[in-house]
Image (cartoon, helix red, strand yellow):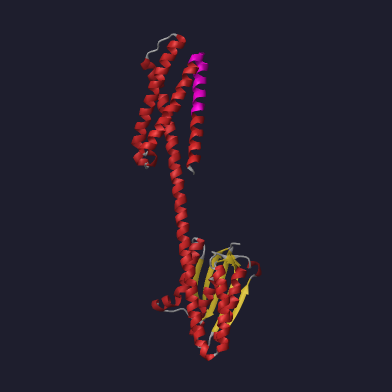
Amino acid sequence: MPKTTKTRLFWTLHILGWLIFTIVNGGVNGYFSGSKSVALINSLVGLWGFLITLGYRRYIHKAGWKDYSLSQLVLPALLGTLIVSCIWMAISALVAYYGIYYLEGQRVPLWILFLNGTISGLLIIAIWTALYFSYHFFRRYTQAEVEKWKLEATLKEAQLAGLRTQINPHFMFNALNNIRALILEDGHKARLMLTHLSDLLRYSLAETQHERVSLKTDLETIDYFMALHSIQFEDKLQFQMEIEEELQEVKVPPMLIQLMIENAIKHGISQQAEGGIIQLSIRKAQEKLSISVKNTGTLATTVEDSRASAGVGVQNIKDRIALLYNGEAHFSLTEESGMVEAKVNLPLTS
């Protein structure tokens, strides 16, 4: 909250609070006593309370009390409340003493006037103190929460940016190696692969700066990607795709599906002498978006091979969905009947 707004809020509440106290205190005492002088005296008591608490506030700022923790504040606040209320009651007693004397010609002992207002004065200053520090504690708490969320958002964006920059080098390394291998064998195929690679890079530059893109847009890259690999693998790679039409505008992390397919090719199809099948299935399941990529092959059976088969891509997928969906997304890698399935379940967003 800007300083001018905070100052305006304080003055509004301070004036309103003491105005209500003065009207109620002066009116009630004046009504029951039937004396206009009593109403006037009690109004002056309210005015002095207004001025004294302003001085109290200034001291609080100067002493730095508003930045204290609750445990640090308890003793100073109690002492401050006691001292300020005593000062206020002492001044109020003097105002009442001389007011009653000059307006009604009566002399009331000063100590009686002081004692009569002690409890109420202490209560009023205690309420003022509690409200004042409660506001500052609440403001500090909300400010700390805002800063916490800003920091977490900045950290999250930095992590996502790091993961996004990880995608391109990983894919580029594999693609350029494949093109290099084809240059001497088949120059025409190598040129086609370069064309498809440029299409993919164009998409990468345009879309990977976003956290999410439409499924329809992301699937366009799959066409380029599979065209690129069909040149390399020829008839050793069969690709099947089944997408529910109504999901075209659902949002997904860019290049997530490509990474899943790339891992299926690298750790599955490329390891099979006779090649194999990749099946992409995207459907709605229990209010989630289910993305499944199946490939011919088997999961590694040793810890070392498991780590190798996971590779950069799978870890990237896990990290990205964890950051983007705060635990509401799930990744799994399973094997059944000679097929490995990588599955991601995401919250449905459009």
Does 152 lie within the magenta span? Answer: no
Identify the residue at horizontal 57%, vertical 73% (top origin).
202
Q: In terms of secondary structure, what is the magenta stretch mainly?
A: helix
**Residue sticking out furthest to the right:** 245
Residue 247 lies left or right of residue 76; in this view the side is right
Q: Which residues are magenta?
A: 18-37
* Residue 201 visible here: yes
Image quadrant for the C terminus? Answer: bottom right
**Residue sticking out furthest to the bottom:** 185
**Residue sticking out furthest to the front:** 4
Identify the residue at horizontal 42%, vertical 9% (top origin).
106
Residue 111 lies left or right of residue 262; in this view the side is left
Residue 312 lies left or right of residue 219; in this view the side is left
Q: Does residue 65 sit above or below 18 in this rendering?
A: below
Q: Position of residue 96 (x, y in %)?
A: 43, 16
Q: Does residue 105 sit above or below 1 in this rendering?
A: above
* Residue 230 visible here: no
User: Along the line of sight, which residue is nearer the eye, 191 or 213?
Assistant: 191
Q: Position of residue 277 (x, y in %)?
A: 56, 82
Q: Position of residue 231 (x, y in %)?
A: 57, 85
Identify the residue at horizontal 40%, vertical 31% (top origin).
56
User: Along the line of sight, which residue is nearer the eye, 277 or 47?
Assistant: 47
Identify the residue at horizontal 58%, vertical 83% (top origin).
192
User: Along the line of sight, which residue is nearer the eye, 143 or 209?
Assistant: 209
Does 34 lie within the magenta span? Answer: yes
Q: Position of residue 17 (x, y in %)?
A: 49, 30
> How many numbered marks, from 0 up?
0
Q: Does residue 218 sit above or below 239 in this rendering?
A: above
